């Protein structure tokens, strides 16, 4: 079964600290992996998209990594801000189709 | 428009009522997707349109769910005889390209509560 598992389920960090969110997937064949940020009550917003040949991609303070061999990805957030508080969702697109498989997300809270 | 627009943002329905949710995608976007997101979960695929053609409706949970995009732009998701388990946020997303390979832009969602 094609699955995307994320950890931790939730995380609380202090403003200014760094954190790393994890994503493991079993989706096959693989096309690309995406990270989305979803603020409460809003739609998901794309942070990064990585294909098989890319192992790292940055978007400001967000850096995503991909290991297609082990089927793992991480999202590293540097110098966190209160506005980073949101759910971060890992999404994998299966090759040859138009289906995205979403993880359940990591709920991040940044506190003063 | 500048982004994907969904309406209504909030809908409360009595069990058994029919509801219609509207999605206005980004102008010129070929692909349009509907997702269902339960509380604390990731979005689950419902259906996919390429222009006016509904190419995949395998995610629709029952025949009470129906979606259309008659002119290849605005789409409507209709739920007949709503049940409590239909309570969720319904997200619409559009993409400039055919299929998912391009960047997907999501609307704010329509939160449906069935009493």
Image: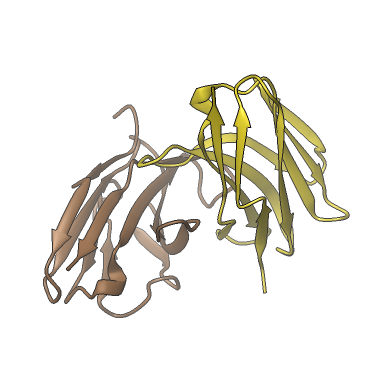
- The image's colouring method is by chain
**Apparent side of residue B16 relative to residue A49 in the rendered image (left or right):** left
Residue at 79% over, 46% down: A52
**Image location of residue B64, percent across then percent down:** 25, 77
User: Eyeballing the image, is A21 above or below A56?
Assistant: below
Asked if residue B97 lies left or right of residue A49, the reply is left
**Pick the front one: B97 or A74:** A74
Residue B75 lies left or right of residue B60; in this view the side is: left
Between residue B74 and residue A41, name the one nearer to us: A41
Which residue is depicted at the point 40% across and 40% down? A40
Up the image or down, A77 lies above or below A75; here it is: above
In this orientation, does residue A84 appear?
yes
Quarter the N terminus of chain A occupies: bottom right
Q: Quadrant of residue A61?
A: top right
Is B40 situated above or below A77?
A: below
In the rendered structure, the colour chosen for chain B is brown
Chain depicted in yellow = A
Q: Residue furthest bottom?
A: B63
Q: Residue furthest right?
A: A69
Quick check: can you spot residue B52?
no
Rendered location of residue B84, percent (x, y): 25, 73
Q: For the point 68% across and 47% down, which residue is it? A: A33
**Could you say where residue B65 lies in the image, as x and y percent from the top left?**
28, 72
The count of marks equals: 0
In percent of width and height, residue B61 lies at: 37, 76
Q: In the rendered view, would you say A56 is above or below B100?
A: above
Figure quadrant of the C terminus of chain A: top right
Name the residue located 20 percent from the left edge and 73 percent from the top edge.
B82
Q: Left or right? Give the position of B15 relative to A44.
A: left
């Amino acid at each position: 079964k094609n699955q995307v598992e994320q950890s931790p389920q939730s995380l609380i960090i202090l403003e200014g600290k760094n954190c790393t969110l994890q994503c493991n997937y079993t989706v096959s064949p693989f096309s690309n992996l995406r990270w989305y940020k979803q603020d409460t009550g809003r739609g998901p917003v794309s942070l990064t998209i990585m294909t098989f040949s890319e192992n790292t991609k940055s978007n400001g303070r967000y850096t995503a990594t991909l290991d297609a061999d082990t089927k793992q990805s991480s999202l590293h957030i540097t110098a966190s801000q209160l506005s980073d508080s949101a759910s971060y969702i890992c999404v994998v697109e299966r090759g040859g189709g138009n289906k995205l498989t979403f993880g359940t997300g990591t709920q991040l809270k940044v506190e003063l | 428009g500048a982004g994907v627009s969904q309406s209504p943002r909030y809908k409360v329905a009595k069990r058994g009522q029919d509801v219609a949710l509207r999605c206005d995608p980004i102008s010129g976007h070929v692909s349009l997707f509907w997702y269902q997101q339960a509380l604390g979960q990731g979005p689950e695929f419902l259906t996919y349109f390429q222009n006016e053609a509904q190419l995949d409706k395998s995610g629709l949970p029952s025949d009470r769910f129906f979606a259309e995009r008659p002119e290849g732009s605005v789409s409507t998701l209709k739920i007949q005889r709503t049940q409590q388990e239909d309570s969720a946020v319904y997200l619409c997303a559009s993409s400039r390209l055919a299929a998912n390979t391009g960047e997907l832009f999501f609307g704010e969602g329509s939160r449906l509560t069935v009493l």
